[in-house]
Amino acid sequence: MNIGIDKIAFYTPEYVLDLVTLAKARGDEPDKYTIGIGQDEQAVIPNYEDVVTMGANAARQIVNDQERQTIDMVVFATESGIDNSKSSAIYVQKLLQLSEFVRTIELKQACYAGTYGLMQARDYVAAHPDKRVLVIDSDIARYGLATAGEVTQGAGAVAMIVATNPRITIINDDSVYMSREVADFWRPVDRTEALVDGHLSTEVYKEMFLTLWQRYKNQTTHVLNDFAGFAFHLPYTKMGKKALDQIMSEADESHQKRLVTNLIASQQFSRHVGNLYTGSVYLSFLSLLSHSKDLNPGEKIAIFSYGSGAEAELYSMTLQPDFRSSIPAESVEKQLSERQHVSVDQYEKIFQSQLLDSHVNVIIPTSQKHQFQFLGWQDGERQYR
């Protein structure tokens, strides 16, 4: 039975910050941002957006009346949850007008949870072939103004529908995974920004990729030449290159060139959005399919998912005959091009406006765009429209 991603969509807020502008404001060389870590722009999230609105705004692009009849579960992966008890998925269920006879669950394990959600969706569909699962990866990467991590911030959501006979890609049953307690990144519940050891996180990322690659080869007998490209978790786009460089010598010269070309293709959307945490690796996958010129049906794409703390998984997908006509490449490009650029001063004011108190009833000024939005609190309850 072939099970995989039948539909995919992406959403990011309507504001964006140019990182050359930020570099100059912070007294840094722009090349440090655009070349050193490989980022050009980052999403700026207004206070009328959160992981629920972003996830719902991504999912609405692929959920129609027919899907409402067959979606049997909503899996919402995030490390930016809005409640310690209530699932973000249940808000999305209401906003999308899904049946009340569906499961709704939220998953957390740093940036890795989206992959676990995808695997759970695949296994559920294997047991219920006539059902479909909506998987949403939605996050806000927030480190603080003028901090070392500021340039790796971002926000957005990727939504996917997992089903039998998928139009985009089959999720192959060849995963290898590992986890280890590492203090490279964490987000205490009493803080509004993450704590991170960037150098340690990079080293653990690279080490886990190399370890899993060796394990993957031993268990599957696949070699590097078997893959048309890689999609990496990209907290910043240079990270994927650092991982792939460790094994590049295993491919022949012509294939090395192809892998480099497709790595660049996989980085394009992330260069203009920033870090999506749980959604990052699937934005990389979407970018690869949208920008690569030489991918063919039947070819395999390797997926490396990493979450600090730390957990990682390596597996493959197989492209389907209609994958090119089933990806929203043009709509994503249009969405990115229509965003409003903000100054550093505007960005800082927007950043600070996120600090809102649920004890105070408030209605937040919202965008005029027709989309799901967070309105504020009423008697401690989150309000959406």
Image (spheres, helix red, strand yellow):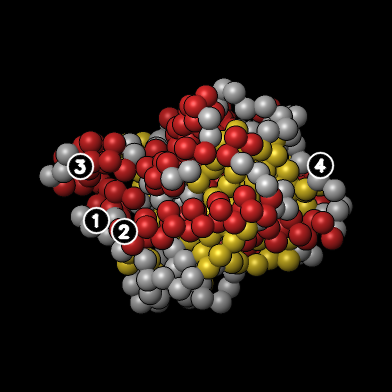
Judge depth for marks 3 and 1 and give the one in front: 1
**Residue position marked by numbered label 4 in the rendering:** 165
Q: Is residue 72 left or right of residue 26?
A: right
- Circle 4 SS class: loop
Residue 231 seen in this snapshot: yes
Q: Residue at x 76, y 59 (%)?
A: 123
Q: Quadrant of the C terminus?
A: bottom right
**Residue position marked by numbered label 3 in the rendering:** 23
| Residue 166 placement: quadrant | top right
Residue 110 seen in this snapshot: no
- Circle 2 SS class: helix
Looking at the picture, does residue 302 appear above or below residue 208?
A: above
**Residue position marked by numbered label 2 in the rendering:** 198
**Residue position marked by numbered label 1 in the rendering:** 148
- Front-most of residues 267 and 209: 209
Judge depth for marks 3 and 2 and give the one in front: 2
The mark nearer the N terminus, 3 or 2, is 3
Q: Please report contact status of discs 1 and 2: CB closer than 8 Å, yes or no.
A: yes
Q: Please report contact status of discs 3 and 2: CB closer than 8 Å, yes or no.
A: no
Q: CA distance from mark 4 to mark 1?
A: 45 Å
- Circle 3 SS class: helix
Q: Residue at x 85, y 58 (%)?
A: 128
Q: CA distance from mark 4 to mark 3?
A: 47 Å
The mark nearer the N terminus, 4 or 3, is 3
- Mark 4: give few (<14), some (14-19) or many (20+) Cα within 10 Å: some
Q: CA distance from mark 3 to mark 1?
A: 12 Å
- Front-most of residues 347 and 228: 228
Looking at the picture, does residue 58 appear above or below residue 377?
A: above
Judge depth for marks 2 and 4 and give the one in front: 2
